[in-house]
Amino acid sequence: MSNRLIFCLWLTLTLCSYAEAQVGVIKGFVVDEQGKRVPGAQVNWQRIMPKGYVEVYGTIVPSSTSDDQGHFSINGLAEGESYKVYAQKEESYYPDMTVGLYNPKDDASIVTAQTADKATDVTVRLGPKAGRLSWQCKDAITGLPMHPTLSVKRTDSGDGFGGGVGHSFLIPADTDVTLTVEARGYQTWYYPGTADKKQSAPLRVGAGEQKLLEIQLERQK
């Protein structure tokens, strides 16, 4: 075997070993506000980048799901890098904490990825629990169902979102938010049910509360 071939094999093995050593892991448990472990929670993470840099993901945001014991494991991370780790379980009223509407200060568990042999379990807490807003929207004259655009915004920080978001979403609990409903050819609807923005009022729900709105949109004159 030539010296050149031996060197190439050595270099390949060295690079592979180096690459393996750089793979980091974050693992641990998802718990609720009482510290109880939560199965079936979705765990998301974002690498903490140097100032001025942004890590861009594709259409699929990376996530992991906690198992029956509430345990999760995130693999394939950059060893030694720090990550913000969030947990959510929307069916239990725990929202996506990567969204400013629910987490305007971007609070998260900050964890450094370690190699598998050094990684220790961390605790990622859900919450705070939100309320759920559901609605039915109809044309005020015909009664036909409509699919408008809803915009919701916190009054304290201005964080919010809007779009065609189905017929239900979570609202941060015990927080004043504004709610606006729009559809082409119709007057804008403001909560609690007016076309006059000056007569609008904030919406507030409690943790775990379900609120149903019957919305009727008037055609523009």
Image: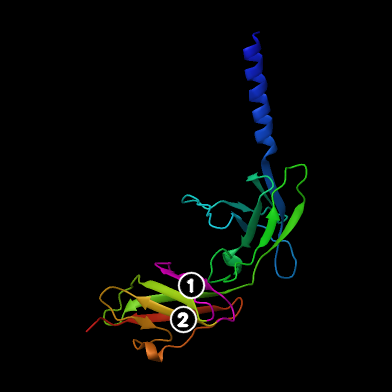
Inspect the magenta stretch and tell me whether residue 157 lies in it.
Answer: yes
Q: Is residue 20 left or right of residue 186?
A: right
Which residue lies at the image location 46% right of the left edge and 51% below the top edge? 59
Residue 160 marker: 1
Q: Amino acid at mark 2?
A: Thr
Q: Estimate the spatial distance between the alpha carbons at disc 2 and disc 1, rounded to whole Å.
A: 9 Å
Circles 2, 1 touching at the beta carbon (< 8 Å) = yes
Residue 71 seen in render: no
Q: Tell me, what colour scheme is on the image?
A: rainbow
Among the two numbered marks 2 and 1 on one chain, the one whose residue lies closer to the N terminus: 1
Q: Residues within 10 Å of mark 2 (few under 14, many from 20)?
A: some
Closer to the camera, 122 or 140?
A: 122
Q: Amino acid at mark 1?
A: Gly
Place of residue 38 in the rendered image (x, y in percent of width and height, measured from the top left): 69, 61
Q: Quadrant of the N terminus?
A: top right
Question: Toward which corner of the image does residue 163 lie, by quadrant?
Answer: bottom left
Q: Is residue 210 left or right of residue 39?
A: left
Q: Is residue 208 above or below residue 53?
A: below
Q: Is residue 152 above or below residue 13?
A: below
Place of residue 63 in the rendered image (x, y in percent of width and height, measured from the top left): 58, 52
Element on which disc 2 rests = strand
Question: Toward which corner of the image does residue 216 lie, by quadrant?
Answer: bottom left
Mark 2 lies on residue: 178
Q: Main secondary structure of the magenta part?
A: loop
Place of residue 87 in the rendered image (x, y in percent of width and height, measured from the top left): 63, 61
Question: Toward which corner of the image does residue 210 lie, by quadrant?
Answer: bottom right
In magenta, the rendered stretch is 156-175
Q: Is residue 184 left or right of residue 164?
A: left
Inspect the magenta stretch and tell me whether residue 29 lies in it.
Answer: no
